Image (cartoon, rainbow, N blue to C red):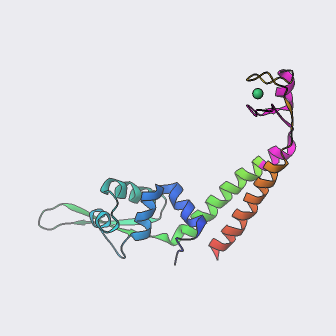
Amino acid sequence: MVDLDNPVIRGYFINLVGEEGFKVVQKMPEGEVTDEKIAEVTGVLLNIVRRTLFILYENRLALYRRVRDTDSGWLTYLWKLELGSLDRQLELESRRILRNLKARLEFEEDKVFYTCKNQDGRYLFEEAAELEFICPECAEDLEYQDNEPIIKALKQRISEIEALSAGAAA
Ligand SMILES: [Zn+2]
């Protein structure tokens, strides 16, 4: 069973299909249902339901079956959530986020930054030197910026995601 209250899972879906789309995932009826039925049950607008289903389908998180009505000849699409590959999707997503955060952390640890007292901009040493250590916005001096708080926040975020994804996989 997928825990939709898990912050990693929740964040993943909101990022993928938005808040309204996440409602569809949360309130989706069991079994195979039409998009009209889903809109009725979830209270989400039909076009948002359709968009959500399409995105879920693209990410292998929903399936549909086409059924032809014998009288009218019209095709009906019956939808079903298929969250079996969610763990895999989450793992990929967590890895992507972690990779970005770690690259950012490495950058912060590697470089020296300069800023003015108004913090108008943030410049690498070479850039600040080119500006002769004067802020182009306010003409105040560009001074060394201690980026330890940024490094600390990045490390914190990395360990949070590592802990959460360990929890989501369990
Ligand atoms: Zn400035």
Residue 57 is at least partly visible in this image:
no
In this rendered view, identify the residue nearer to me: 145 or 54. 145
Residue 111 falls within the magenta-colored stretch: yes
**Splitting the image into 4 quarters, where does residue 139 fall?**
top right
The x, y position of residue 158, in whole percent, is 74, 59
Magenta-tinted stretch: 105-131
Q: Is residue 158 visible?
A: yes
Dividing the image into four equal quarters, which quarter contains ligand 1?
top right
User: How far across and down, in percent of the image, does residue 14 sit?
Assistant: 51, 58
Query: On the rendered structure, is 127 left or right of 169?
Result: right
Query: Where residue 97 appears, x then y in whole percent?
Result: 67, 55
Q: Depth check: give the residue in front, 63 or 11.
A: 11
Residue at x 32% of width, y 53% of height: 47
In this view, which residue lies farthest toward the left?
71
Tell me the residue at 67%/68% (across/down). 164
Q: Nearer the viewer, residue 84 or 101?
A: 101
Name the side, left or right, on which 145 lies relative to 104: right
**Residue 61 percent coordinates (x, y):** 47, 65
Q: Please name the residue shown 75% across and 63% down the image.
A: 159
